[in-house]
Amino acid sequence: MTNTKGYRRGTRYLFSRKFRHHGPLPSSVYMRVYRRGDIVDIKGDGGVQKGMPHKSYHGRTGRVYNVTPHAVGIIVNKRVGNRIIPKRINVRIELYFNKKNVIDRLQDRIF
């Protein structure tokens, strides 16, 4: 067979759910509050296909610049050739998480 070139090529294990973690997501995932300026990690999840980012953004860290009811806009730096381009992508709520160590450091500075 020839090498396919689809949008989700090579993501069999990248987007798969962990063992014993299949099924619907807990409601706490949908109750999280995000604001502009938050630093988040992007992590694709095979259980949610809508609004999934491209595999090149999996594991990347970005900053929230736009918030909508079901998704957020995230600015992510992407290396293209010898330059770095800030890309603006829209990602569903279920597919990213707050960056914990950055939040702790920012709170230490504030208080």
Image: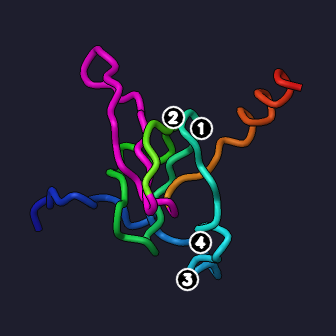
Dot 3 alpha-carbon crowd within 10 angstroms: few under 14, some 14 to 19, many 20 or more: few
Q: Nearer the viewer, mark 4 or mark 3?
A: 3
Return the residue at label 1.
38
Q: CA distance from mark 2 to mark 1?
A: 6 Å
Give whichever of discs 1 and 4 has the lower sequence position: 4
Instruction: Describe the element under mark 1 as helix, strand or loop.
Output: loop
The magenta-colored residue range is: 69-94
Q: Nearer the viewer, mark 2 or mark 3?
A: 2
Q: Quadrant of residue 102?
A: top right
Return the residue at label 3.
24
Relative to 27, is 44 above or below? above
Main SS category, magenta section: strand
Q: Residue furthest bottom?
A: 23
- Looking at the rendered structure, the kind of residue marked 1 is Asp
Q: Nearer the viewer, mark 1 or mark 3?
A: 1
Label annotation for residue 18: 4
Label annotation for residue 63: 2
Kindly identify the residue that appears in the image at 43 percent across and 71 percent down. 48
Q: Is residue 72 one of those drawn in magenta?
A: yes
Measuring from the top left, give residue 12's x and y in whole percent.
38, 67
Q: Nearer the viewer, mark 4 or mark 2?
A: 2
Instruction: Describe the element under mark 4 as helix, strand or loop.
Output: loop
Give whichever of discs 4 and 2 has the lower sequence position: 4
Q: CA distance from mark 1 to mark 4?
A: 27 Å
Give whichever of discs 2 and 1 has the lower sequence position: 1
Kindly identify the residue that appears in the image at 58 percent across and 77 percent down. 25
Measuring from the top left, give residue 18's x and y in whole percent.
59, 72
